[in-house]
């Protein structure tokens, strides 16, 4: 299969490509990424020169480029990760979120429609099994109170420009199934964490600031709850859904580890206290925990996200494998190694 992966130099995309190429020999991947501030070729170190991987730097909004890639590489699968993904940035600069997340998704859908379908909506010879997998977020559903879970039936109620742009892209993908019969699947997952996540996100910020002995900022009262999904479990779920899921369907993917932001910060500080104890003569602080500082809350900050992923468990036989303890330890070790590399290179 010739798969166009968009946004493959970002956090989840790069983990996914590395994961898939280790597991399958029958896929050729064309990785289209604009390399915005969030994309990094270092994330692709293991696979960049792999014979089944071709990297193309470019914009998903560039219709000519995307059409050419479909044609030249005979693309018959799309896994669409590329997006502006940081809620705080979307509050500061919403326009680029609309551009990339909505218009960019439309561009890739259009290429798939033109390349795979005849005018009457039937599939062209050789493209009968072509499929389009759209990667989305649970943030499209808005916020939960203390009780309850999101399911595939939950109404959309996005509260930030980021989640509104992702919700719009989900609707476009849905419309291409109902209007044109394009084989599409959407997955909406909870908060991911793991190696290669951009520094700006919560968990890397906690680890980085702790190691630099700088204040660890926590929004509001720290009680906002997220359902944490280890990135490798997400990659396993994407593989399952892409190859075995039912077209036109949506699947929710959850981590089953609901934690408040303050709880996450405290867990990380406790692990760092063991893995990288503060110097005994440090007069300022005895534990990284003392670096935690509450800061003004994010506008429109959703209180709680939590996922009921019964559907993917039953229909695709997927289940998360990593406990939060295992995932967070692996993540912390990754950032510790990264810090050691930076210090060694600086010397
Ligand atoms: P990321 O910000 O780490 O990576 C995004 C990648 O897309 C980057 O490599 C960037 O260069 C690329 N990109 C951005 N604009 C582009 C454009 N116009 N053309 C081509 N490439 C472009 O994001 P991530 O955390 O890896 O998220 C990947 C996808 O998963 C996104 O669609 C996001 O909405 C979704 N998602 C993420 C999470 C999470 O917790 N990280 C949770 C749910 C859903």
Image (cartoon, rainbow, N blue to C red):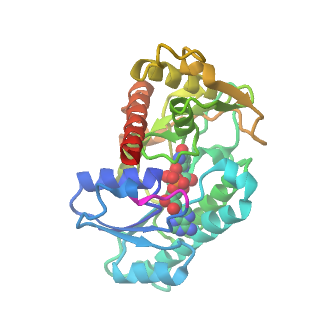
Apparent side of residue 158 relative to residue 62 in the rendered image (left or right) = right
Residue 152 coordinates in the image, percent (x, y): 57, 45
Which residue is at the front of the view, 102 or 204? 204
Residue 281 coordinates in the image, percent (x, y): 50, 14
Q: Is residue 320 visible?
A: no
User: Which contiguous range is marked in magenta?
Assistant: 37-41
Apparent side of residue 145 relative to residue 60 in the rendered image (left or right) = right
How many numbered dots are placed on residues in this image? 0
Apparent side of residue 323 relative to residue 143 in the rendered image (left or right) = left
Residue sitting at the far front: 347
Q: What residue appears at the point 47 percent right and 41 percent down from the top-left corner?
A: 311
The quarter of the image holding the C terminus is top left
| Magenta highlight: main SS | loop
Tell me the quarter of the picture where residue 262 sits.
top right
Apparent side of residue 79 relative to residue 87 in the rendered image (left or right) = left
Residue 125 coordinates in the image, percent (x, y): 33, 81
Q: What residue appears at the point 60 percent right and 58 percent down from the top-left corner?
A: 84
Q: Is residue 331 visible?
A: yes
Which residue is at the front of the view, 299 or 152? 299
Q: Specify whether residue 53 is painted magenta.
A: no
Residue 276 coordinates in the image, percent (x, y): 42, 23
The quarter of the image holding the N terminus is bottom left
Relative to 282, residue 89 above or below: below
Relative to 261, residue 346 above or below: below
Which residue is at the front of the view, 13 or 49? 49
Q: What residue appears at the point 54 percent right and 35 percent down from the top-left corner?
A: 308
Tell me the quarter of the picture where residue 299 sits.
top right
């Amino acid at each position: 299969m010739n798969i166009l992966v968009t946004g493959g130099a970002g956090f989840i995309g790069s983990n996914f490509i590395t994961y898939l190429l280790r597991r399958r020999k029958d896929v050729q991947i064309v990785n289209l990424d604009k390399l915005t501030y969030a994309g990094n070729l270092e994330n692709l170190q293991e696979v960049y020169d792999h014979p089944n991987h071709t990297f193309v730097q470019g914009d998903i909004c560039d219709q000519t480029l995307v059409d050419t890639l479909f044609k030249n590489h005979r693309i018959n699968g799309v896994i669409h990760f590329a997006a502006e993904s940081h809620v705080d940035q979307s509050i500061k600069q919403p326009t680029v979120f609309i551009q990339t997340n909505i218009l960019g998704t439309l561009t890739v859908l259009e290429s798939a429609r033109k390349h795979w379908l005849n005018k009457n909506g039937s599939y062209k010879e050789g493209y009968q099994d072509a499929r389009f997998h759209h990667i989305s977020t649970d943030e499209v559903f808005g916020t939960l109170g203390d009780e309850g879970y999101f399911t595939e039936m939950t109404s959309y109620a996005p509260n930030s420009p980021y989640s509104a742009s992702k919700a719009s892209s989900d609707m476009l993908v849905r419309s291409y199934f109902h209007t044109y019969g394009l084989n599409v699947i959407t997955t909406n997952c909870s908060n991911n964490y793991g190696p290669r996540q951009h520094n700006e996100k919560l968990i890397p910020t906690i680890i980085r600031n702790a190691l630099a002995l700088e204040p660890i900022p926590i929004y509001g009262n720290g009680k906002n709850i997220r359902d944490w999904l280890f990135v490798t479990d997400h990659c396993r779920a994407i593989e399952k859904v892409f190859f075995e899921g039912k077209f036109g369907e949506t699947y929710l993917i959850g981590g089953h580890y609901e934690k408040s932001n303050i709880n996450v910060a405290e867990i990380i500080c406790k692990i760092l206290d063991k893995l990288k104890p503060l110097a005994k003569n440090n007069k300022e602080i005895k534990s990284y925990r003392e670096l935690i500082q509450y800061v003004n809350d994010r506008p429109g900050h959703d209180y709680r996200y939590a996922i009921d992923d019964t559907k993917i468990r039953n229909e695709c036989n997927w289940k998360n494998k990593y406990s939060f303890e295992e995932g967070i330890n692996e993540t912390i070790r990754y950032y510790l190694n990264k810090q050691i590399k930076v210090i060694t290179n600086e010397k």
